[in-house]
């Protein structure tokens, strides 16, 4: 993982911060963005990452209806493979689809987010954003706040940071916390203020209003009062703390507008690192022997 | 076979829970579909079957199967379902009514029973719907369906969500001889869920359902059985607190019975970790944690649960190839139920063969009110020869069922049916199903 972060950092310096953002590393290679759930941000990020490395990108917007037969999904992927793509990036609303696809296809499959399961490149870009500022990840306390139960971002951050030795606290309303998740160094709490007391990194998750009503949550006003990263709460954090949000934000709900402008918030840095880690991932899986 | 040849099965160990009879070296003679008394029929020629080392057991009943006909015959039909039963050594089934259309009228009950009778591979007892179309709105014509041959009523696949409707059905059952079977699941707690809400679900990011979705409704049903005096049968028990409700019902001497499935006795939600996103593990109610599995085994041992049923729910490969959250619930179970019984309960010494086999004989017979008298002279010859020590590996490609979906795939089971007879005719021998 550290290896990936280092190559992401190299690519960021060599390409993203260079005047001409073009490399030939992946020239002649093609991959497909197979998105069954709308997401402009992640899709654009993968697309740019590929283009900066010289790869060709095909965007495929699947219908993504849950009644669609799996057969169709796998047929689509097999067809794309038959057309000669070298890698498939997939986003799907059902957990496990990327893993299933990887069994069907012989080319690499990159998970761009599946159901409530995982969003690995998000986990990597969050790690990178923190690691750039503090390489001692094992000394850190990460607090993730929001709808943990339905968050693939929370899961990927959780595995990524805990693998690097960090302590992780998951915070949210009781109905949005998993009831069973016995993982070492990971604790669950509903008390955001207590968790913030010694937090080094705060990941603020987006609240999805539909899911919130499903789980019997109170109003957004009450959510903000208890679990929002308000300006007052941000004051509790130390000067070197890192504030993250995977976007898009509901300003004034899970995060206050002044907090987004706080120098400790690195939300745009996350977006930039998103392209960097995706370049590193694509390069790792499609580049191979050019180094 | 000509009508005047006696089939004589010698040397097997007879285990007949219907008569409470166990004999080490049985000698059973069958003529014209019936069991002969010892002095009867001696003038006829004999075909002798050497069954040494095997058990011979009368009518094995699986009281919870889905045969999908009419309406969903790409998943299964009455013929393939009957073949699966014969292959599994099961000589009688009760078929759930959640077909398309739903079996909710006397005409459909008769049609289904006749279809199975014509095939002659298994005795089929229709279960009628509790409510019209199993929609939970209006009580179906239970009395007329009973007269047409329905042996129980259920909206299985769906719970009876309305307590008022469940009360009405249980009250009405006091004027019938048939039980009300409920698939207990509070849909408002289970919405969107595909697995048990536990550690494996949290790791895989699959929406989970707590045991409470089942047990809250089992408690409701048991309390309504107390209120009405109705006959309640709880389908596929999987939750710990459901067992407490059954114990309470027993203490109160209520007419409450219950069943467990082999998959809930053999597997836990750790199967999700092993199978990942392969939906063969997707079943409703879901596979539960080890503590619940153990509680279920204990409840079966104690007799709180008196029936083993497969909840045979075959699905087409294409349906089971959908992403996990979208795939249908269900396991193809008829061809593994006997091995499941021996492996889960007899082989580890948890129950004697006689007591364990009650779960497939007198248990369901009592619930459905069939009145089978086992292999007593004059009775219809429904029997299964079982090799109790045979260890075999579950291979769904060898199934007769069209449903190949089972998380027992690849598992070694002990105990397998060698032959099965319905009404004096062999329907399966040495693993091969024999059509009439
Ligand atoms: Zn059911």
Image (tube, coloured by chain):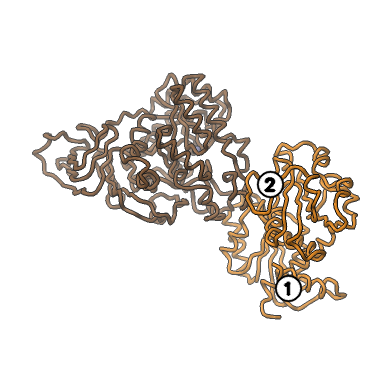
Chain colours: A orange, B brown
Q: Are marks 2 and 1 on the same chain?
A: yes
Place of residue B212 in the rendered image (x, y in percent of width and height, measured from the top left): 58, 35
**Label 1 Cα neighbours within 10 Å, binned few <14 / some 14-19 / many ≥20:** many
Residue B44 against residue B104 in the figure, above or below: below
B6 and B276: which is toward the camera? B276
Q: Single out the residue that lies furthest toward the bottom.
A: A290
Residue A148 against residue B240 in the figure, above or below: below
B236 horizontally vs A41: left or right:
left
Residue ID for mark 2 = A149
Place of residue A30 in the rendered image (x, y in percent of width and height, measured from the top left): 69, 72
A119 and B117: which is toward the camera? A119
B409 horizontally vs B210: left or right:
left
Q: Residue at x 51, y 33 (%)?
A: B242
Mark 2: secondary structure: loop
Place of residue A206 in the rendered image (x, y in percent of width and height, measured from the top left): 78, 49
A100 horizontally vs B408: left or right:
right
* Rendering quarter of residue B197: top right
**Mark-to-mark CA distance, 2 and 1:** 36 Å
Residue A172 against residue B230 in the figure, above or below: below
- Tell which subunit mark 1 falls on: A
User: Assess mark 2: CB under 8 A from ligand 1?
Assistant: no
Q: Residue at x 45, y 24 (%)?
A: B251
Residue ID for mark 1 = A55
Image quadrant in which the N terminus of chain A is located:
bottom right
């Amino acid at each position: 993982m550290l290896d990936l972060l280092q190559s992401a950092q190299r690519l960021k310096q060599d390409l993203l911060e260079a005047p001409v953002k073009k490399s030939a590393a992946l020239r002649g290679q093609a991959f497909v963005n197979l998105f069954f759930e709308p997401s402009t941000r992640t899709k654009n990020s993968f697309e740019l990452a590929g283009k900066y490395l010289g790869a060709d990108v095909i965007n495929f917007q699947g219908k993504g209806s849950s009644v669609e037969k799996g057969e169709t999904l796998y047929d689509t992927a097999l067809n794309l493979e038959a057309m000669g793509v070298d890698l498939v990036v997939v986003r799907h609303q059902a957990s496990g689809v990327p893993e299933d696809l990887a069994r069907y296809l012989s080319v690499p499959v990159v998970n761009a987010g599946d159901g409530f399961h995982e969003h690995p490149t998000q986990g990597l870009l969050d790690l990178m954003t923190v690691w750039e500022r503090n390489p001692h990840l094992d000394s850190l306390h990460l607090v993730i706040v929001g709808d943990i139960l339905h968050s693939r971002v929370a899961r990927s951050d959780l595995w990524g940071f805990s693998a690097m030795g960090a302590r992780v606290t998951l915070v949210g309303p009781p109905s949005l916390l998993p009831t069973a998740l016995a993982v070492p160094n990971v604790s669950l709490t509903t008390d955001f203020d207590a968790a913030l007391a010694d937090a080094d990194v705060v990941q603020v998750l987006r609240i999805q209003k539909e899911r919130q009503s499903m789980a019997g949550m109170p109003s957004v006003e009450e959510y903000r009062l208890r679990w929002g990263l308000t300006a007052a709460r941000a004051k509790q954090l130390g000067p070197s703390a890192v504030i993250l949000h995977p976007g898009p934000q509901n300003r004034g709900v899970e995060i206050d507008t002044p907090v987004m402008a706080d120098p400790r918030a690195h939300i745009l840095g996350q977006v930039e690192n998103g392209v960097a880690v995706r370049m590193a991932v694509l390069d790792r899986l499609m580049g191979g022997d050019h180094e | 076979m000509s009508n005047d040849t006696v089939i004589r099965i010698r040397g097997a160990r007879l285990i007949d829970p219907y008569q409470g009879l166990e004999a080490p070296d049985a000698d059973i003679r069958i003529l014209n579909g019936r069991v002969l008394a010892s002095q009867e029929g001696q003038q006829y020629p004999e075909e002798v079957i050497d069954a040494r080392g095997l058990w011979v057991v009368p009518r094995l009943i699986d009281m919870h199967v889905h045969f999908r006909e009419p309406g969903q015959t790409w998943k299964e039909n009455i013929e393939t379902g009957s073949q699966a039963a014969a292959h599994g050594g099961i000589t009688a089934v009760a078929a759930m009514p959640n077909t398309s259309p739903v079996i909710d009228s006397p005409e459909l009950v008769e049609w289904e029973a006749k279809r199975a009778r014509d095939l002659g591979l298994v005795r089929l007892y229709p279960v009628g719907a509790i409510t019209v179309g199993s929609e939970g709105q209006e009580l179906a014509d239970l009395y007329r369906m009973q007269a047409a041959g329905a042996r129980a009523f259920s909206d299985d696949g769906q719970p009876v969500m309305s307590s008022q409707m469940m009360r009405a059905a249980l009250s009405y059952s006091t004027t019938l001889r048939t039980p009300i079977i409920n698939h207990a699941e509070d849909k408002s707690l289970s919405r969107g869920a595909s697995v048990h809400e536990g550690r494996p679900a949290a790791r895989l990011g699959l929406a989970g359902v707590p045991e409470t979705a089942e047990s809250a409704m089992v408690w409701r049903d048991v309390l309504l059985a107390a209120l009405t005096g109705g006959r309640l049968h709880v389908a596929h028990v999987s939750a710990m607190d459901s067992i407490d409700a059954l114990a309470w019902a027993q203490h109160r001497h209520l007419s409450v019975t219950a069943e467990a499935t082999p998959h809930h006795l053999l597997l836990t939600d750790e199967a999700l970790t092993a199978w990942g996103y392969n939906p063969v593990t997707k079943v409703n109610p879901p596979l539960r944690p080890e503590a619940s599995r153990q509680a279920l085994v204990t409840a079966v041992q104690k007799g709180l649960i008196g029936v083993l049923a497969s909840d045979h729910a075959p699905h087409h490969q294409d349906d089971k190839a959908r992403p996990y959250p979208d795939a249908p619930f269900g396991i193809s179970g008829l061809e593994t139920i006997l091995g499941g019984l021996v492996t889960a309960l007899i082989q580890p010494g948890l129950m004697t063969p006689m007591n364990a086999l009650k779960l497939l004989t007198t248990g369901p017979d009592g619930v459905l009110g069939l009145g089978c008298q086992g292999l007593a002279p004059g009775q219809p010859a429904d029997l299964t020869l079982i090799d109790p020590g045979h260890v075999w590996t579950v291979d769904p490609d060898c199934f007769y069922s069209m449903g190949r979906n089972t998380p027992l795939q690849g598992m070694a089971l002990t105990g397998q049916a060698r032959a099965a007879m319905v009404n004096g005719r062999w329907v399966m021998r040495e693993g091969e199903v024999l059509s009439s």
